Every structure is written in C-alpha cells, then in structure tokens.
Amino acid sequence: MTDAATDLQLMTLDVNGEEHEVLAESRRTLVDVLRHDLRLTGTHVGCEHGICGACTVLVDDRPVRACLMFAAQAEGARIRTVESLSDGTDGCELSDLQQAFSAHHGLQCGFCTPGFLMLAEGFLAERPDASKEEIREVVAANLCRCTGYQTIVEAIDGCAAARRRAGKEK
Ligand code: FES
Ligand code: FES
C-alpha cells in the first residue's frame, strides 16, 4: 500500500523468520530498513553502491547486496541477516561458521565480517563440497582491507569440512 503524497509504503518483511511491518519510502534500501527501522545493525554499510559486499544478506537463500535492493522488492522473500546465524544452542553464542572464522583468524577489525559470513553461508548451502579454489573465487566478491583473505578462505573451508564430517557421522 503506497501513500502517493508521501511515497510511504507499508511493507511486510520476513526477516530471520519473523514478520515485520515497516512504513518506509518506496526508494528506501533494504540495508537501511534492516539497520534503521528494524535495528538489525549486524549488517554493515560500506560503499553503498554494490562494491564492497559489507551489506550482504541472504534473500531466499542467495547472497544479495542489501544496499542495491529496495526493501519493497524483498516483500514475500525470506531475508536472513547475520543475527540469524547463531541460535545459542549447545551453550554457544556463535554458529559453526562464526566459530571457524574465530579459530582461523578470519577477521581483524571485523567490519567486513558480517558480509563474508552471509556470503559464505549462502555459498556453502548451495555448494557444500566446494574446493578451496572455488571458495577463493567466491570471497573475491567482497572486500576486506585487513586479512589478506587467506584466513577467510581457511575458515570457510574448515567449516565446510567439519559439516561434511558431521554429515557422514549421522
Ligand atoms: S555497502 Fe553494499 S556493497 Fe558496499
Ligand atoms: S577484517 Fe577489517 S576489513 Fe575485513
């Protein structure tokens, strides 16, 4: 529903499994709605024009740059942000992927980390058997000024290997 005078639009967004009603301008980006309207500030904003990947979230399981998408375009889709990764089970506040980033020193300042986590989460769901070479190609989509990328690749590869081992044990 749009108010023509103000261009305000009432939208319903499914974020991390919860429905949210948001009244926002139709040109408001998804990342702005996530951070400012829903207070999900784990998603970061860097370049604001699709280059750095800091704003990466999952939309219907696919990594998307939330600064390039209008929030209204995400109506009807399942949106996942970095806040969805850990459910706090097993007494641990971090997901297996987050733990792998920690164990392999896949972050330094951490500004880029939510974007890399969601990029990797989406990629591993689709390609659980990905090679290190493929992981290297995927992480090239996002920018990190600190790590030199090698430890990010090791973290994602380590998480994928652990998930495969766990899958075989089941
Ligand atoms: S803030 Fe979206 S790609 Fe940089
Ligand atoms: S850890 Fe600092 S930009 Fe990536």
Image (cartoon, rainbow, N blue to C red):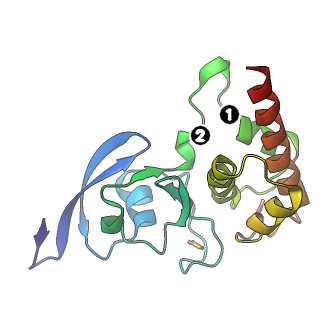
Looking at this view, is 71 or 158 the one in front?
Answer: 158
Rounded to the nearest whole Å, what is the CA distance between mark 1 and mark 2? 7 Å
The percent coordinates of residue 170 (x first, y second) are 73, 20
Report the front residue among 44 and 156.
156
- Determine the residue positioned at 69% across, 58% down: 116
The picture quadrant where one finds residue 166 is: top right
Q: In which quarter of the image is ligand 2?
A: bottom right
Q: Residue 85 carries which label?
A: 2
Check residue 21 in the rendering and tell me which mark sits there, or answer none: none
Picture quarter with the N terminus = bottom left
Residue at image position (73%, 46%) is 128
Secondary structure state at the residue bearing disc 1: loop
Where residue 87 appears, as percent x and y from the top left, is 56, 29
Counting labels gives 2
Find residue 37 and report its horizontal and vertical position in percent.
Answer: 34, 56
Residue at 44% x, 43% y is 16
In this picture, residue 92 sits left or right of residue 164:
left
Asked whether the beta carbons under mark 1 and mark 2 sit within 8 Å of each other, the answer is yes
Residue 4, quarter of picture: bottom left
- Element on which disc 2 rests: loop
Image-quadrant location for residue 134: bottom right
Return the residue at label 1: 94
Q: Is residue 9 left or right of residue 52?
A: left
The image position of residue 104, as x and y in percent, is 88, 45
Which residue is located at x 9 percent, y 79 percent? 5
